Image (cartoon, rainbow, N blue to C red):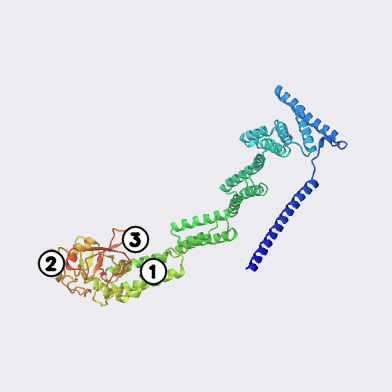
Amino acid sequence: MAKNHRKRRNSFFSRLFKKALLATAVVALSAAVIVGFWLLSELGPKEVDYSNMELEPGVLEKRAYFAERLQASVELVEAFEEILVLRKPSKEDLLLLEQAVAAQREYVEGRPNAEMEQVKRLEFLEKQYQDFAVKDTLSLSLEAEGEAAKLAGADKIEEALAQYQLAWQLQEKINEEFPLSHAQDPSRTARLRRSSEFLTAEPIYRESLAYEREADVKRAVKDWAAAKEALEKAIQLQDTLNSKHRGTRQADVSRSGKLQTKLVGVLSGEGFIRITEIVQMADARRVAGDNLEAASYYEEAARLQKILNLEYPDSPHASPERVVEYQRKSQTSQSYELGLEIEANHDALQDFLASRKIRAAIDKIVDLRRDIMQMEETYPRSSLNDSNLQVKIRYLNLIQNDIGFIQEHLYRRMLKVSDSGGWSMLTTEVTQGLYSIVMGQNPSRLKADDHPVDSVSWREAKTFCQRLSWIMGKPVRLPNENEFREALGPLRYLALEDYTWSASNSGGDAHPVASQGAFGNGYFDLLGNVSEWLESMDRFEDEDAKHIGGHAQDNLEAIFTVPVRNSPRGERNRMTGFRIVAQL
């Protein structure tokens, strides 16, 4: 236990010793820092007593000189201000202010540490001097005089130009020599320069316009040489404006192009007048009935127009379309007799078909086919080439062996509609067999020759009517609604199931035409079977067309109302067909 007591006592003295050492170290460090600061303060800059310093030789003299210059500037400004109170300062008076500025500048520049107040005073005096210096410049009055001269008319243009140029020069001088003055204005310099350039270019532009007007007068009287000379001068002057006065309003590259086009027109004008005269002679010969001579004149006009187009492609008289037009007129005149023959043969064909003289009609079809082919091959540009007639004769030539059968078939199945102006209606719907012969195809879903054609659009039905009219030599079309209802007659006492194919008896499909009873006026299947397209003349071409009568999938109640439906003209539906009327 005594041993433990000794250990605790030794540990206590050890800790006490360490604390004493730490305290001694802190005191020593603090003393070192204080000594360091003291040494620095002793070694640093000392306060200087300038009152006891001896100045270098000449410093007092410089101080006195600059103070004298400042005083001189103040006195000169005071003297100038006294003059301002009494009168308007003259150029000699302005020398006082100029001298004041010079003295003030000498003071500021000679004293590197000059007071800011004196620096600002220098800036004020410089601006004041420049404002007074430019006060009597004539730039503004010169511009006003120039503007007045410009408005006085063309005779005063040179005088106006002289005034503007002087004003411009004075303003440039002000901007360079007096940049602090209120009159300094770079934008005004630019404006005066533009005005001067405008007035420089204006006489040139007016002269160019005068030459252009002269050229127009000479061209009107066909004095081509004088017109050419005047236009060349106008172009030369405009080119000068474009190259030397590009920033002015008178510079106009597009006008140069227009003048060049006029010049080319003048150069080609004589040739164009000759072409026009030849065309006029050709027109006169054609009116007189001398078609061959007219054709030769038109051909010559076409030849000369080709030459003009090659030599002067930029001329307003150059025109490939005119070449084609003159060739067309030439070939039309040359083919005139052949055209008359085609027209006469076509009239005869119509008569033969209408009167059912099939053999004679076929002979005319062959003749027309030959003549039309000759017209196409020999005179392809002739306006007597009738594309519609070509299609018609080509079709009739193709179907010539069926013409007699088709006519016989229709005449046996047409009945006149009362109060319809001579129109007769087909007693049945158009069958698939008849449609196939006329059109060369059968679009129907359920194919059978004795069934009504279906899945045919309104436009296809109209094409069928057109071809049938070619075959019959008579107008053929779709019936209108009044004709359809007239043919139908009254329904009050009819048992419709005996006259129609409807949903109740059709099985959902169309049946052979005329396989039910005829209505009172002798027509079959006006109701049911397939709905029938109408002429729809009361509608625009882009509007829907009408079809009437219902179809095999309608119930009897709906069919009894004689339903009229609308469908797009290009629509094909297996429940829609048609019948035709013809003016026999």
Q: Are marks 3 and 2 in contact (CB under 8 Å)?
A: no
Secondary structure type for disc 2? loop
| Position of residue 321 measured from the top left corner of the image (x, y, whole percent) | 50, 60
Q: Is residue 48 visible?
A: yes
Task: Examine the image and state in which quarter residue 249 appears.
Answer: top right
| Count of picture labels | 3
Callout 1, which amino acid? Gln
Up-down relation of residue 70 to residue 246 (above or below): above
Q: What label sits on residue 542 in the rendered view?
A: 3
Task: State the residue in front, 28 or 486.
Answer: 28
If the image is split into quadrants, where does the C terminus sit? bottom left
Task: Examine the image and state in which quarter residue 485 appears.
Answer: bottom left
Task: State the residue in front, 171 or 520.
Answer: 171
Q: Are marks 1 and 2 in contact (CB under 8 Å)?
A: no
Q: Is residue 341 visible?
A: no
If the image is split into quadrants, where does the N terminus sit? bottom right
Side (left or right) of 137 relative to 433: right
Q: Nearer the viewer, mark 1 or mark 2?
A: 2
Task: State the residue in front, 7 or 441.
Answer: 7
Q: Give the residue pinned by disc 2.
A: 494
Which numbered disc flags the more N-terminal residue, 3 or 2? 2
Number of residues whose C-alpha sits closer than 10 Å to that of mark 2, classed few (under 14), some (14–19) or many (20 or more): few
Secondary structure type for disc 1? helix
Residue at 58% x, 45% y: name it.
Answer: 217
Callout 3, which amino acid? Asp
Find the residue positioned furthest to the left. Answer: 493
As measured in the structure, the alpha-carbon distance from the residue carrying label 1 to the one carrying label 2 is: 49 Å
Q: Give the residue pinned by disc 1.
A: 390
| Position of residue 65 measured from the top left corner of the image (x, y, whole percent) | 83, 32
